[in-house]
Image: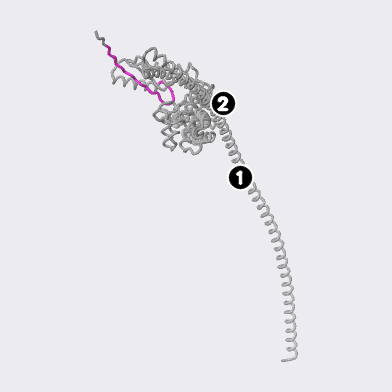
Amino acid sequence: MTAETAQTILYCLFFFLLGVAAVLAVVQRLYSKFQEKIQSQADQLKVSARKEAEVERNQMLVDAKDKAYEIKAAAEKEIAAERAQQNRLLQKLEHRREVLAKQEESVQKQQHRIESDQSQLNSQLQSVAQQRADLDRQIQEQTVVLEQVSGLSRDEATEKLLGTLRSELDQEVGSQIIKHHKALQEKLKQQSRDILLTAMQRFASTHTAESTTSTVDVPTDDMKGRIIGREGRNIRAFEKLTGVDLIIDDTPGVVIVSGFDPVRREIARASLDKLIADGRIHPSKIEEVVAQTGEEIDEFIVKKGVEAADEVNVPGLHRRVVQMLGRLHFRTSYSQNVLRHSVEVAFLAGLLAEMLGMDGDLARRCGLLHDIGKAADHELEGGHPKIGGDLLARSGESAEVVHAARGHHDDIVTQHPYTMLVATADACSASRPGARRESLERYVKRMEELEAIATRFEGVQQAFAISAGRELRVLVDSNRTDDASAAIICREIAKAFEHELTYPGEIKVTVVRESQFNEFAK
């Protein structure tokens, strides 16, 4: 190897080492920059994490404050409800206290009356004792005189005098008993009047007369044609689904909904209003609207029943009873709303019961449910007392409530005092001024219609409408009819009533055929 070759190798080795050192320097510089970038990103991440943690902490504080506010509001609402409940309990206790105070005052008055009567009785007993002493003295004097004049023995004279005295004493005692009996009757009558008047004065009720006629306003005559539909398909579908009759005549702007069932009539009226407002009237739409309206009316009926029960504080009613009670909102009797009438009877019966020292809650329950049968008397056979009593018995009501429903019209023998309270309250509610608005002329006309329909049948002599038109007594000629024809006449009269008259419940037709035979003994 030459010197030049060795020198060349050294130069190459030197430049190689120099290049390696340069590369190492560049790598170290890039590594330093990379570490600085990493450190910068780490610092940024720390700052971002701090900011997110701060935001999350603030959000948690806000959520905690909202939750605390909700808890506080719920607590305040619960406290308010508890206070309201306590206030109601205090009011009820105050009412009970007032009732007890009045009862105590009444008892004290009765005690004073009894003491006065006792003192009068003592004075009368003293007077009788004085009279007896006078009679004894007179007896002794008469004994001496009789022994001298009549020549009777002492025993015979004593027996005669005792008979005379017994007769006189019996007459005196009888007159005193009659006198006190009449005075006691007058006092009891006056007390009963005071109790009844006080109960009626304490209960103040408003009355709103409702019409049983349902009419629907129609904007144009063209709408009447749409209601009828092509070849009458719309009106037929409507009447079939609702169970009512639509009367569309020449009267402008009015369609009359005719149906005896008040609930069906209300469903039909509300459905027709919706169809007119919507404008689309065809069988499928009618079916949809009627079904929807029926559900709304069912909810409304339950709501009315619950409101009436809450108003008179009668809890624990069966759902079926609540529903039937709500149906009474659509039922009227001589223009008097039956549900409001039932509420009035409940209040009056409760007041009377409390004043007489009886159970006011039970009396209110009897009064509220006494006319429950009117909600179904057009669907079931029998009068509303029997229908209502059977319904309440199946619903688990007590014997007093069932008997009040069955006997408030004196149809059966009264077995419970609450039935008499309900009957009294029922009469007060029905007969007070403004409760029922049927005129005397209309009442007489309805009676005459019943009698006129019956008397036009062959063989009928006389017909008498009784029980406010709920029963008809028919007398037939026994010479012109036999038992079989009398039964046929009875059935034909009932059918004529069904076809020619509109009436709630049912009318009982009784045909009487009597044969009389007279002979003279000579």
Residue 242 in percent (x, y) is at 45, 31
Q: Is residue 439 left or right of residue 166?
A: right
**Image quarter hosting the C terminus:** top left
User: SS class of the residue under badge 1?
Assistant: helix
Q: Nearer the viewer, residue 33 or 214?
A: 214
* Vertical comparison of 190 with 298: above or below: above
Q: Of label 2 and label 1, which has the lower sequence position?
A: 1
**Image quarter hosting the N terminus:** bottom right
Residue denoted by label 1: 78
Q: Is residue 509 magenta?
A: yes
> Where does the magenta region start and end?
500-518
Residue 401 in percent (x, y) is at 45, 33
* Residue 352: numbered disc: none
Residue denoted by label 2: 201
User: SS class of the residue under badge 2?
Assistant: helix
Residue 311 image-quadrant placement: top right
Q: Amino acid at mark 2?
A: Gln
Q: Main secondary structure of the magenta part?
A: loop
Q: Nearer the viewer, residue 418 or 79?
A: 418
Q: Nearer the viewer, residue 166 or 179?
A: 166
- Tag 1: Cα neighbours inside 10 Å, few (<14), some, or many (≥20)? few
* Vertical comparison of 161 with 268: above or below: above
